[in-house]
Image (tube, rainbow, N blue to C red):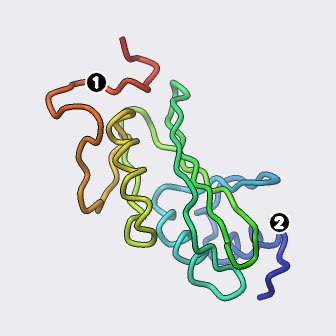
Amino acid sequence: MTASLSGSQIADILKERFGDGITEVNEDSLLVKSRALPDIAAFLKNTAGLEFDFLNSITGTDYKEYFELVYRLESLKDNRNLILKVRCPEDEPVVPSLTGLWRGADFQEREIYDVMGISFTVHPNLKRLFLWDSFEKHPLRKDYL
């Protein structure tokens, strides 16, 4: 693979390798299934010619019907980025953790867990970051009042 791959070429490579793990491709982002997220992220990080070696940010949004997480990956070597999106239902807000790939995911996943109530499986230290343990709600959810 070469460093000059376009976003659509990267999407084609991922669709070929992960099949239905990729559910939607947009100009600047890929919507992936939660179960496929760790494998897709590892492939993007560790494959020569892709090497998205930096997790810039993880953000979460409550769309009432579902939660959406947005992962912004960067290739520092090639000065390019890629956005992965993952959706999870409000009644089962669980997504695999990416702390095993990027240590920077630790703080960001904990923040999302604290303020949105989305859990991350296999996270090494998933506990509240800002709010106290007995706080029962999540202030960035639409149903918070």
Q: Which mark is residue 8?
A: 2
Tell me residue 127's x, y (percent).
23, 46
Q: Secondary structure at mark 2?
A: helix
Q: Quadrant of residue 33?
A: bottom right
Nearest the viewer among 59 and 38 is: 59
Q: Quadrant of the N terminus?
A: bottom right
Q: Quadrant of the C terminus?
A: top left
Nearest the viewer among 130 and 90 is: 130
Tell me residue 7's x, y (percent).
80, 65
Q: Quadrant of residue 139?
A: top left
Mark 2 / mark 1, whichever is N-terminal:
2
The residue sitting at 43% across, 59% down in the picture is: 105
Q: Is residue 143 left or right of residue 6?
A: left
Q: Secondary structure at mark 1?
A: loop
Q: Which mark is residue 103?
A: none
Tell me residue 22's x, y (percent).
64, 60
Q: Is 74 placed above or below 34 here?
A: below
Q: Is 50 placed above or below 33 here?
A: below
Tell me residue 2's x, y (percent).
80, 87
Q: Amino acid at mark 1?
A: Lys
Q: Amino acid at mark 2?
A: Ser
